[in-house]
Image (cartoon, rainbow, N blue to C red):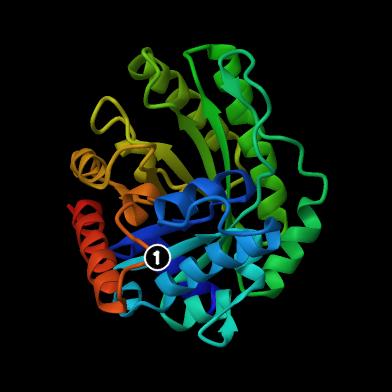
Amino acid sequence: MNRQQMTDRIASGQGFIAALDQSGGSTPKALRGYGIEEGTWNGDDEMFALIHAMRSRIVESPCFGNGKVLGAILFEKTMDGESGGRPVPDRLAERGIVPFLKVDKGLEDEADGVQMMKPMPDLESLLARAKDKGVFGTKMRSVIKANDTAGIKAMVHQQFAEGARILAAGLMPILEPEYDITAADRAEGEKVLLEAILEGLDALPEGQQVMLKLSIPAEAGLYAGLARHPKVLRVVALSGGYSTDEACELLARNPGMIASFSRGLLQDLRSGQSDDEFDATLGAAIDRIHAASVA
């Protein structure tokens, strides 16, 4: 796929984006969920080799390339690795899957009800390397813990400011201002978030677009207008701790949003499954998430 074909696939494809971007801090938890306990590996290199083997098994599964997965978000080490004897971004593109890269460096401590992103001083060099490898876009996450207008607006401003650096490098940014689904004030806070996002979109230069990755809103349909906004390529939803069934049920109530699930996609996969069991389990999750995304 060339870049225009990737843009068209993300903009109008009937499917979802897989989140395969667990990084250093979340990798042990992801491996435990996969049935590999801590103590099985010695050092980070072995840990990342295990998570890469899991991701490669997913990428190479027949069901992953059946057209229902539009894109996949990668961790940096996954982008630099191989699957099926090919660099991972190339292998994804061969399978009709648009590659994205997680670029944030984690979260600051909570202040004003939010966790901002840590600084990314080396972002431009990472973006250049990603573009050379055929990556289409990026993803970066920050988190809202409480309905604090100043904090939410500052966090969204940071997302758009970093998005401008990504656009300048010729890549498509996925902005992810996640709202913690356990927050008691989420319904009201998400309206503040929506207002802040619209302000950011209004300030974008004409002809530029971003993508948005948002928690499934407490009020169904809240983000429908964002999905139709001319400066938004696509709105995707994170599973945010919901189970696959819960996330799919809630997503189906939100036209215009498609899934970008991690836990919702991977929760039933285990290292000890036979290839047939693994493929059947992954295929069932893909079918459920796809159905909710196109509902």
Q: Quadrant of residue 229?
A: top left
Residue at 54% x, 62% y: name it: 51
Residue at image position (60%, 35%) is 203
| Rendering coords of residue 289 (x, y %) | 25, 55
Q: Is residue 93 above or below residue 193?
A: below
Q: In percent of the image, x 55 and y 50: which residue is there?
A: 38
Q: Secondary structure at mark 1?
A: loop
Relative side of 267 to 169, left or right: left
Q: Is 157 placed above or below 206 here? A: above
Which image quarter: residue 127?
Answer: bottom right
Depth check, front residue: 64 or 252:
64
Q: Which of the two residues, 105 or 204, is positioned nearer the viewer here?
A: 105
In the picture as drawn, the residue positioned furthest to the front comes out as 39
Look at mark 1 in the image and give the residue it sits on: 271
Residue 44 coordinates in the image, percent (x, y): 69, 57
* Side (left or right) of 237 relative to 147: left
Residue at 72 percent of width and 48 percent of height? 165
Coordinates of residue 158 in the picture (x, y in percent): 66, 32
Amino acid type assigned to the residue bearing label 1 in the image:
Ser
Q: Position of residue 21 (x, y in %)?
A: 53, 55
